[in-house]
Image: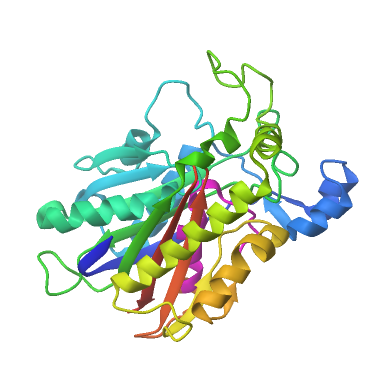
Amino acid sequence: MRLPYPLGISGPTLWLPRGRQSAAEAVARELVDAETAGELGYAGLPVADLAAPEMAVEAGRGALTAAGVGPGAVGLLLHAWIHYQGHDLWSPAHFVADRLGAAGAVPLGVQQVCNGGAAAVEMAAARLLVEPGLGHALITTADAFLAPGFDRWSGDYGIGYGDGATALVLHHLPGSEGGRPADLILHSVATVAAPRLERMHRGDDPFGPAARSLGPTVDIRRTKKAFLQAEGMEAFTGTSAAALRSAVESCLAGAGLSATGDAPLRYVVAPRLGRKTIDLAYAPVLTKLTGAPLLRPGDDTGHLGAGDAAASLAELCAGRMLGPGEYALVVSAGAGFTWSCLLVSGA
């Protein structure tokens, strides 16, 4: 999405639970074999002692405080997640808004699987641009991948799942109605989808009457194996590379930059997937397209469900890694499949 003018990102927050399980402990407990743990490359994964929406409230409170924004100034609250939020038929977005005191906000849930956080940023940006008087948009994500319903170490290929939450405030910059200074500046967002790949998370499974009716634990390996047996690996790798390339080029073009390796990017930030997955599916495309240093976050978080992109924005901000005019391209991906890129700079 080409923005007619940049928007501000303030208070990006990564909230992680105190509990964690090291890779060494997971191997010792036979939750994952040593070879797979090495390919994942995570030192450990955070383990929640709160429900996912409760973690989102903590992240949201931190983001609002860091941004200096009161809950009453939030006109839109978007909450994204990929896994069970604690109740069967319920809106976690409304829970987050209520607990934060954002009584005037319109809460919306965003379910675009692991790309949900980036999708929420894009949706919030569109709403802010067409409704300048909206105020501030608060975007939260949260997931808890707890046993027995989810196998965080071995339930998927090339990904380990960590518990945690993120939040950020999206708003207008000075010069616009209600504008304010920001921590980061959002210049462009681009999203590309490949719906033909939806079967990777459906496989040959029949439609069930309720969650986990086919088994007590989410089994992503089963569905991916069925897809690959039917379609072949190239059906995924070729489509993925083309979509990722298109998302990068569109995002840079939206800010008037060119993906020739000469774009003034300080960093390109990969999703928080396993080391081997990044090496095979992301690093070759991103390095060739941009020539920028590739950051591989997530060694101490694992994949945060819908929160990868916001977590990386939080770390860019906390580490003061971008000066004014220095750009970073944050990459997000999710089942379906969908790829998004966010182009930000230091404020």
- Could you tell me residue 277's position as x and y percent? 68, 58
Residue 304 included in the magenta stretch of the image: yes
Front in this rendered view, residue 157 or 50: 157
Please report the residue visible at 58 percent of the width from the left and 40 percent of the height from the top: 144
Measuring 66% from the left and 38% from the top, which residue is drawn there? 224
Between 219 and 313, the residue placed more toward the observer is: 219
In which quadrant of the rendered view does residue 152 lie?
Answer: top right
Q: Nearer the viewer, residue 56 or 161?
A: 161
Q: Is residue 296 visible?
A: no
Residue 251 seen in this snapshot: yes
Task: Name the residue furthest top.
Answer: 209
Specify start and end residues of the magenta stretch as a single range: 296-316
Magenta-drawn stretch contains 254: no
Which residue is depicted at the point 69% across and 22% down? 216
The answer to which image quadrant residue 112 occupies is top left
**Who's the residue at 71% across and 38% down the image?**
155
> Residue 161 in the image: x percent, y percent?
64, 47
What is the count of numbered marks?
A: 0
**Seen in the image, is 289 located left or right of residue 122?**
right
Judge whether 177 appears above or below 125 on screen.
below
User: Where is 111 relative to 184, above or below?
Assistant: above
Residue 145 location, x and y as percent? 62, 39
Seen in the image, is 195 located left or right of residue 277?
left
Spot occupied by residue 211 in the image (x, y as percentages of width and height): 56, 21
